[in-house]
Amino acid sequence: MYHCLSSESVKDLIRFLKREDDTCDIRRQLGHAQIVQNDLIPILVNYTGDNTLWETVVRYEGFNPSC
């Protein structure tokens, strides 16, 4: 199984979310693209041996939504 998200890509997602304004545009786009369901959860399930990627995804999953 191949996922195009790397730990650097997930870190980019986290950086975008930290900079998000009150419009919540980034969260809406990520939700529309179903990043969590289609990419992040499969990474958690299938890539347990890649500690850096797994820990970064967990950090993203724990990001507290403010919108």
Image (tube, helix red, strand yellow):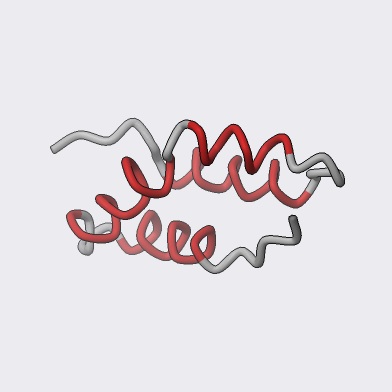
Residue located farthest toward the left when viewing the structure as drawn:
1
In the drawing, does residue 27 fall left or right of residue 46?
Answer: right
Residue at (29%, 60%) from the top-left corner? 44
Q: Quadrant location of residue 62?
A: bottom right
In the drawing, does residue 5 fall left or right of residue 24?
Answer: left
User: Residue 35 location, x and y as percent?
Assistant: 43, 40
Total marks placed: 0
In terms of depth relative to the viewer, which is nearer, 21 or 2?
Answer: 21
Residue at (53%, 58%) from the top-left corner? 60
User: Residue 10 location, x and y as percent?
Assistant: 50, 45
Q: Quadrant location of residue 2?
A: top left
User: Residue 20 location, x and y as percent?
Assistant: 79, 44
In the drawing, does residue 2 fall left or right of residue 12?
Answer: left
Give the quadrant of the N terminus: top left
Residue at (25%, 50%) from the top-left corner? 42
Give the quadrant of the C terminus: bottom right
Residue located farthest toward the right when viewing the structure as drawn:
22
Residue at (60%, 40%) from the top-left corner? 12
> Please, is residue 13 above or below residue 29 in the view?
below
